[in-house]
Amino acid sequence: MRPLDIAVAGAGVGGLAVGALLRRAGHDVTVFDKFAEPAPVGSGLVVQPIGLSVLKALGADQRALELGNAITAMRGREADQGRRVLEVSYVTPKASRFGLAIHRAALFDALYGAAQAAGVALVSASQVTGLDGAHLLFTDRREGPFDLIIDASGAGSVLSPLKANPLGYGALWATVDWPSDTPLPRDELRQMYRRANRMMGVLPIGSLPDATGFKAAIFWSLPADGVAAWRKTGLQAWKDEAVSLWPEFAPFVDQITDPDQMTAASYTHGTLVRPYGDGIAYIGDAAHRASPQLGQGANMALLDAWALSQAIAEARSDVPLTLLYYARARRWHVWSYQTMSRLFTPQYQSDSRVLPVLRDRLLFPLSQVQPVPRILTRLVCGDMLPPTGSLPDPD
């Protein structure tokens, strides 16, 4: 297998992971990032068990486990009656697994360390503007030629042909200290819903690289075009509404004293039928985008990185064959999770009055009858289908 000269656009989860994997395999890898100093964007997320396997293969798992926080269940209730409407456990009679709740800054720290240890060349302040054959174009220069270009630049990619559809609901996120007086457990994601047009949650995410104390990521669902109205209504009105729906939310939301502490996130849905082009592979949000409802965003980027690294090894550095292997390896896993996301999201984030009733009165009771709980556990863990097809899975 001859070493390839590889360019990666974007130093996010997928970009750093694929860079480290390929450099460790002996390829020359340069990761270009638009920021003056590579940095994470966003708040909390969950790395599912299959994603943790990729971190382990990278040698990034110990740092991630040190900073993050293991969660063993995801639970949600309906605000008016307090009925359970979401109940998924990572623990089954045959296996005891966990998801790793972690701040993006902490996950970035672990992956950045792995990339540096592998010897990946990281070039900052490099805004990719386009592609010219085997060359990457930047605002001030042209780099290349490269044997392979990997687009890991996320939802804002200028290289990806993906045309995604905007979703009707987004969310506001913030990172706060874990209150000493909360009754909420540190090992579960907890959510509260009123129908499907109000959703809030608390995710215990552990610590940050340069901060002290245990942290939580909190989120509040709202229409994608509702941020201006939320600001106009005022913080106190929002806090009053949130606490009236979920009193246990009070010590978390009380820490928000400025609207700018909340970061708005909008979501889109779409998938490239062919996640590659002539000499370029698309991974992560550059290849597929969805609501974070199933908690698979970081997982998908890590699995794309792993599958692409294995495809290169299987094809013995034949780039056209690599791209075919990569696409085939990820096709069914990506399709299944994108389909599930499309089906699940309107039940929790929409203006529908019918879907929440079906969710609460029919679908949730059914979800508690075997074998459905085992299926839901596999769904959340990320291995409902083989994640990399016929290519080797991460151990």
Image (tube, grey):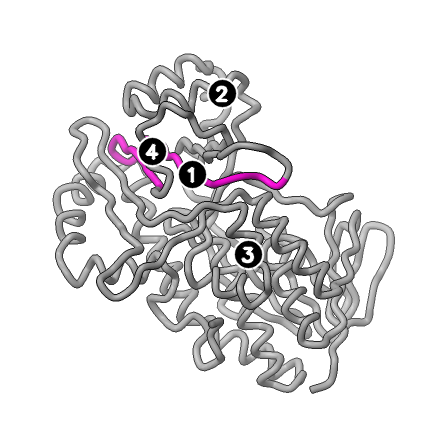
> Looking at numbered disc 4 in the image, what kind of residue is underneath it?
Met
- Residue at the image point whose x is 54% and y is 61% from the top: 55
- Read off the residue under disc 4: 199
Q: Earlier in the sequence, mark 2 or mark 3?
A: 3
Crowding at mark 1 (Cα within 10 Å: few <14, some 14-19, many 20+)? many
| Cα distance in 3D space between marks 2 and 3 | 32 Å
Tag 1's secondary structure?
Answer: strand
Residue 301's x, y, as percent?
A: 53, 59
| In this rendering, position of residue 279 left or right of residue 222 | right
Instruction: Check disc 4 and report its element: helix, strand or loop.
Output: strand
- Residues tagged 2 and 3 counted as in contact (Cβ below 8 A): no
* Magenta-colored segment: predominant secondary structure: strand
Q: Is residue 361 above or below residue 133?
A: above
Task: Tell me which amino acid carries mark 2.
Answer: Ile
Q: Amino acid at mark 1?
A: Pro
* Residue 342 point in image, percent of width and height: 35, 53
Give how far apart the Cα atoms at labels 4 and 1 are: 17 Å
